[in-house]
Image (cartoon, helix red, strand yellow):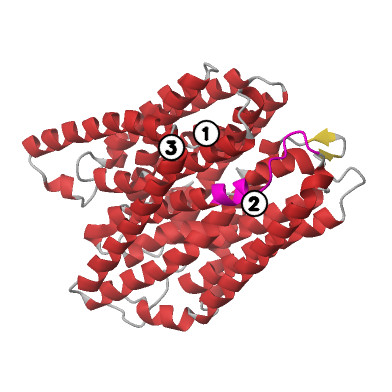
Amino acid sequence: MSSLKARLDKIPEGSAALFFIQMFSTLGFAVLQTSLVLYATKQLHFADKPAQSLMSLFGAFNYGLHLFGGYLGGRFMSNRNLFVGGMALQVLGCACIASGSVAMLYWGLALFLTGSGLNVTCINMMLTQRFTPDDPRREGAFLWNYAGMNLGFFIGISVAGYFYESGRWGAMFTFATVGNFVAIVLAFLCWRLLTDRNTPLSTASAQQFRTRGIAGIAILVGLVPIVWYLLQHPDSTTVFVEVVCALVFMAIGWVAARHPIRFERRNMGAYLVLACGSLVFWSLYQIQTNGLTLFYDRNVDPVVLGITISPQWVQNINTVVIVIGGPLLAALFSSLRARGWRIDIPMQFSASLVIMGAGFLFLPLGIGLADTAGRSSFLWIALFYVMQTIAELLISPVGYAMIGKLAPRQYQGVMMGAWMLLTGLASIFAGELSKSIPTAQDAAPQLTNPFYAMLFGRLGWATVGVGIVLALLIPFLRRLISSQDTPDVDELAPAVVPH
């Protein structure tokens, strides 16, 4: 017992609570992300391209609004207040979608996306505030938190697949509603542990706190009709999102160039270079829940040992590997670094892109070995998901932890939001790639297999190439990444599993 208590004492206050809050807050998103394109095409009878546009905007708004969440949280509302407010909107959104009509689908998505878009950054900021910039436990904590998020994904995806097979769409979205509500309850139970630390709002007077809080609530509510409108105009909204992303990163580049502290300016430069690699990664990654979901549903044999694997369940390969691999990766990195291996941010980013590209190359191989009906074996898409997950573990949690390392304190919220905004832009690109596939509803797999094989092959080799280019830039990036107190250190602190 004393040993267990000693281990728990080493975990910063609030970190364990955020693990479970993260898990339950993920349930609704897991259901919608893996089921929206299927729900739109099968239940609401959308054509492929409108459904894919809706799915790409789902990702764009969910991730794109993280930027505003990073700005609102800690300035207008505390991160814990904004998190609870966003979760309340998600609860209402899932309830609307559960009604089963097209009109309520758009209102439900507007509510849900506003909530999820604004509150996800809050969890990352609450977690990063529990550590000093050089705390060696930071990366391990983010890997554990990432495992908690994916445990929520596993539960949400499993339940979504069960209801999908039985055609119970209303029950599926009701489950998502309940999961989001539990996250709110947990946040209230752990309210004291989640207090903000060192944010602009923490030094505000009582009057300023109230005034900014009212403004924050008005923004939170006012965004809902705006998102509702934009969802119904996908073409113009796509251009709008692309312009916003370009302006945001131009602004960060301008701020970085004028920043007075040299080592922080260099760190921000490294952030911008790595952002390009992140954009490539997430553009390909998000094909999984868009065009790749339809590919699996129509062109892959889903039966394994007599069991039919639903399109949602296949994505649990990703969650299982992350839940198991996240803590193992943290321990492995700690061990290798202790032996003198130099595993740092640039190396992980370049390796993730090479692995991502290699995973895509399994898909045309499976198509080439398809059965007489034109359906690929489940084995090939399973190998694809394993490779994508290994790549994700290398780039995603370390990307979040990297913000605390590279971003000056006054820009951390905005740069965390901008990092997630990239994923929103990537969703748009993933949607465009998915829509490049010819409409295939009710078509025989043999008719679409040649195009799929060509597309997956090109994506795979191109991504491997980008990874190699980034690997060649490793020495340059290592020179950019530095710390004021230890200028020769150019990597994140070793990953350590909390114990």
Whichever of callouts 2 and 1 sits on the residue coming sooner in the sequence is: 1
Q: Is residue 391 left or right of residue 124?
A: right
Image position of 414 with respect to 183: above or below: below
Q: Amino acid at mark 1?
A: Leu
Where in the figure is residue 410, as x and y percent of width and height?
A: 21, 58
Crowd class of label 1 (few under 14; some 14 to 19; many from 20; radius 10 Å): many
Image position of 162 with respect to 355: above or below: above
Whichever of callouts 3 and 1 sits on the residue coming sooner in the sequence is: 3
Residue at image location 52% in from the left, 52% down from the top: 429
Q: Is residue 464 left or right of residue 266?
A: right
Question: Which image quarter: residue 450?
Answer: bottom right
User: Secondary structure beneath disc 3?
Assistant: helix
Label 2 vs label 1: CA separation? 18 Å
Label 3 vs label 2: CA separation? 21 Å
Along the line of sight, which residue is nearer the eye, 341 or 175? 175
Where in the figure is residue 313, as x and y percent of width and height?
A: 69, 38
Where in the figure is residue 444, as x and y percent of width and height?
A: 82, 39
Residue named by callout 2: 321
Image position of 469 with respect to 400: above or below: below
Along the line of sight, which residue is nearer the eye, 94 or 408? 94
Residue at image location 49% in from the left, 55% down from the top: 143
User: Secondary structure beneath disc 2?
Assistant: helix
Residue named by callout 3: 21
User: Secondary structure beneath disc 1?
Assistant: helix
Q: Amino acid at mark 3?
A: Ile
Residue at image location 29% in from the left, 57% down from the top: 412
Residue named by callout 1: 27
Residue at image location 29% in from the left, 53% down from the top: 413
Q: Which residues are magenta?
A: 430-443
Q: Is residue 445 visible?
A: yes
Question: Which image quarter: residue 93?
Answer: top left
